[in-house]
Amino acid sequence: MGGVTGTDEGVLVLAGTPIGEVGDAPPRLAAELAEADVVAAEDTRRLRRLASTLGVTVGGRVVSYFEGNEAARTPELADELAGGARVLLVTDAGMPSVSDPGYRLVAAAVERGVRVTAVPGPSAVLTALAVSGLPVDRFCFEGFPPRKPGERSARLRELADERRTLVFFESPHRLAASLTAMAETLGAERRAAVCRELTKTYEEVRRGRLDELARWAEPGVRGEITVVVAGAEPARRSAEPAALAERVAAREAAGQRRKEAIAEVAREAGVPKRTVFDAVVAAKS
């Protein structure tokens, strides 16, 4: 596979950067850093440290491109692309656009007919999936769960019966709360893996049930976190009274009103709401 090629047409290059181990940087990254007309970086200081470690001098103009100025800077970069510039986009770690700046610029480039390509590189999502020990044949990436407890619980309820493996990013100071909410909504026994500081010196992959992982995280966890959660098992759709009552209780614990929880469980199990109501009453008697 070749490196940078000369062209009179603009091109947007999305480049993956190491998520921890600098040696994981793709070889083409150094060539792109040297040849790009503009390098848009989430953190310009971190970019220059990376370039120095790779032994490369950034040849073009370096501009910041982060959440705070992404909307304002996108039109400027799109104009440069339309004018024939080669723009390299990098974030602090991993692939641009994946829970990081980049989507707006890609959309603007596509709208203007500018070529968009990528330098494949490390990905916390795929790395965590690979080491989790959970099924990886089908998965969905959910990014960061909502910060507010109510919104987080509502999002998790939408995923309660998702059969694919789930991947989340989470901040270390919210990890325990998120794992607790997952245990309450998805099921305490649901298998999961918390991947911390992937590829770094203190890399750790903690595997277990969601309730076990929530207790482990309670004292506090540091570092970059990726959480992988097994998909729902078909058995969770059981119409047995005890199972129906358990699913209603899980939704109530997550903040849903009982009437709504009963209606949802009845719909998912394919039984009358009265059947679920009777199961809940029986469980409490």
Image (cartoon, rainbow, N blue to C red):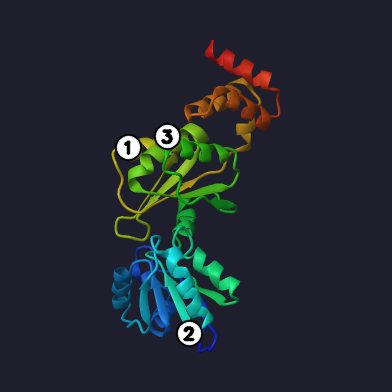
From the image, which quarter does the C terminus lie in? Answer: top right
Cα distance in 3D space between marks 3 and 1: 11 Å
Q: Residue at the location (44% across, 37% down)? A: 210
Find residue 248 and report its horizontal and vertical position in percent.
56, 25
Q: Can see residue 188?
A: no
Seen in the picture, residue 157 relative to 259 is either above or below; the reply is below
Q: Which residue of the protein is positioned furthest toward the top in this rendering?
A: 285
Seen in the picture, residue 258 relative to 111 is either above or below; the reply is above
Mark 3 / mark 2, whichever is N-terminal? 2
Q: Can see residue 71?
A: yes
Q: Dot 2, how many residues are within 10 Å of its Cα: few (below 14), some (14-19), or many (20+)?
A: some
**Pointer 3: what residue?**
211
Seen in the picture, residue 54 relative to 8 is either above or below; the reply is above
Q: Dot 3, how many residues are within 10 Å of its Cα: few (below 14), some (14-19), or many (20+)?
A: many
**Pointer 1: what residue?**
218
**Pointer 2: what residue?**
4
Find residue 157 and report its horizontal and vertical position in percent.
54, 36
Q: Secondary structure at mark 1?
A: loop
Cα distance in 3D space between marks 2 and 1: 48 Å
**Identity, as a three-letter code, of the amino acid under mark 2:** Val
Numbered marks: total? 3
55, 49: nearer the viewer: 49
Mark 2 / mark 1, whichever is N-terminal? 2
**Identity, as a three-letter code, of the amino acid under mark 3:** Asp
What number is the disc on residue 145? Answer: none
Q: Secondary structure at mark 2?
A: loop
Asked whether disc 3 touches disc 2, contact meaning CB atoms under 8 Å apart, the reply is no
